[in-house]
């Protein structure tokens, strides 16, 4: 008989192999641990990062509730209790014989330690369902870091991405490590050296500021009104703004940060 999850050969009568059984039990226990942080995350004013030991408490309850978190808790509760009934062989429609646990945390713990966890027929299906819920819970408690494109790799020209606090970035293709500031400056230099590269005042101001050269959109608009910059239907030329803002300063910054 093959494991319903990883397709490896298992003992007769087992729906999951030993490794997948341990993984499913561990996921259930991890979800039980996450119940309290999930309830705390119902507060819409709470700072993101539910696993953090320090939380921002609101001064005046009640506070707005995050409906997406409430729906996730309800889904997890329904799945856990359905799994418990399947493990105990109770008909889902026969609610009179449903030995409900005191709370969701206790239900998850009971499922993780149930002797039939790896032997009941739909173990693989519930394992996939529980894994999906665990991924959603992690996304709520520890939101993934927002990463955005910063420029291309100097060696292989692959587009690189970095978070707001990253100082170094590693190219996923060639493996070279480069300073984030250098990559941003190199991208700005390419934009400024190509007369065809154009954009709005906001786009140009953002590109310069990201590279460490503060330029305000209002300043660019003032230069347009004074006739220092020519605005076309395609937008402003990066090179024209470059000449007004820094001149040769960009080359100096690249030399220092390289």
Image (cartoon, rainbow, N blue to C red):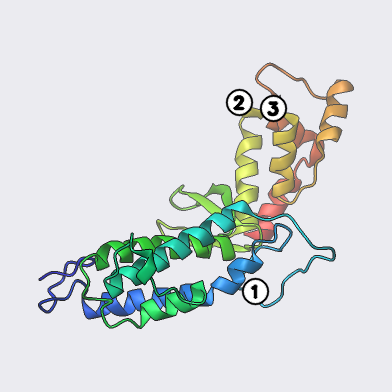
- Judge the density around disc 1: few (<14), some (14-19), many (≥20) Cα neighbours within 10 Å: few
How far, Cα to Cα, is label 2 from label 3?
Answer: 7 Å
Cβ–Cβ below 8 Å for labels 3 and 1? no
Q: Position of residue 258 (x, y in %)?
A: 62, 59
State the quadrant of the N terminus. bottom left
Residue 174: x, y in percent? 41, 58
Q: Going 29% across and 75% down the picture, which residue do you hit? A: 88
Judge whether 134 appears above or below 30 on screen: above
Residue closer to the observer: 230 or 51: 51
Q: Secondary structure at mark 2?
A: loop
Label 3 Cα crowd, 10 Å radius (few <14 / some 14-19 / many 20+): many
Which quadrant would residue 78 be assigned to in this image?
Answer: bottom left
**Among numbered discs 2 and 3, the one appearing first in the sequence:** 2
Q: CA distance from mark 3 to mark 1?
A: 46 Å
How many numbered markers are drawn? Answer: 3
Choose top left, top right, bottom left or bottom right for residue 22.
bottom left
For disc 3, the marked residue is 237
In this rendering, does residue 212 appear at all? yes
Residue lying farthest top?
233
Q: What residue is disc 1 on?
A: 52
The residue indicated by pointer 2 is 196
Quarter of the figure with residue 238: top right
Q: Residue at x 71, y 75 (%)?
A: 54
Label 2: how many Cα within 10 Å (few below 14, some 14–19, many 20+): few
Q: CA–CA distance between discs 2 and 1?
A: 48 Å
Decide if residue 6 is on the left or right side of residue 257: left
Front one among 122 and 94: 94
Callout 3: SS: strand
**Residue beneath the point at 33% across and 59% down:** 93
**Image location of residue 62, percent across then percent down:** 78, 60
- Of tags 2 and 1, the one toward the viewer is 1
Q: Earlier in the sequence, mark 3 or mark 1?
A: 1
């Amino acid at each position: 008989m093959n494991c319903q999850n990883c397709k490896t050969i298992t003992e007769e009568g087992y729906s999951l192999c030993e490794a997948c059984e341990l993984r499913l039990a561990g996921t259930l226990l991890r979800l039980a641990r996450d119940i309290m942080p999930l309830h705390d995350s119902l507060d819409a004013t709470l700072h993101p990062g539910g696993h953090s030991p320090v939380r921002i408490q609101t001064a005046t309850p009640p506070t707005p509730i995050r409906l997406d978190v409430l729906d996730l808790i309800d889904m997890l509760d329904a799945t856990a209790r359905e799994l418990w009934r399947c493990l105990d062989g109770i008909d889902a429609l026969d609610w009179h014989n449903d030995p409900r646990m005191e709370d969701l945390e206790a239900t998850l713990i009971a499922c993780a330690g149930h002797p039939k966890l790896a032997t009941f027929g739909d173990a693989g299906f519930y394992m996939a369902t529980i894994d999906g819920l665990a991924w959603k819970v992690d996304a709520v408690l520890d939101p993934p870091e927002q990463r955005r494109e910063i420029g291309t790799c100097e060696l292989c020209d692959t587009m690189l991405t970095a978070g707001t606090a990253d100082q170094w970035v590693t190219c996923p293709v060639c493996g070279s490590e480069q300073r984030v500031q250098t990559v941003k400056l190199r991208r700005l230099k390419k934009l400024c050296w190509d007369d065809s590269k154009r954009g709005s005042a906001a786009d140009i101001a953002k590109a310069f500021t990201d590279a460490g050269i503060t330029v305000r959109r209002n300043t660019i608009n003032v230069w347009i009104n004074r006739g220092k910059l020519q605005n076309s239907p395609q937008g402003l030329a990066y090179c024209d703004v470059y000449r007004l803002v820094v001149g040769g300063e960009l080359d100096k910054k690249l030399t220092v940060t390289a």
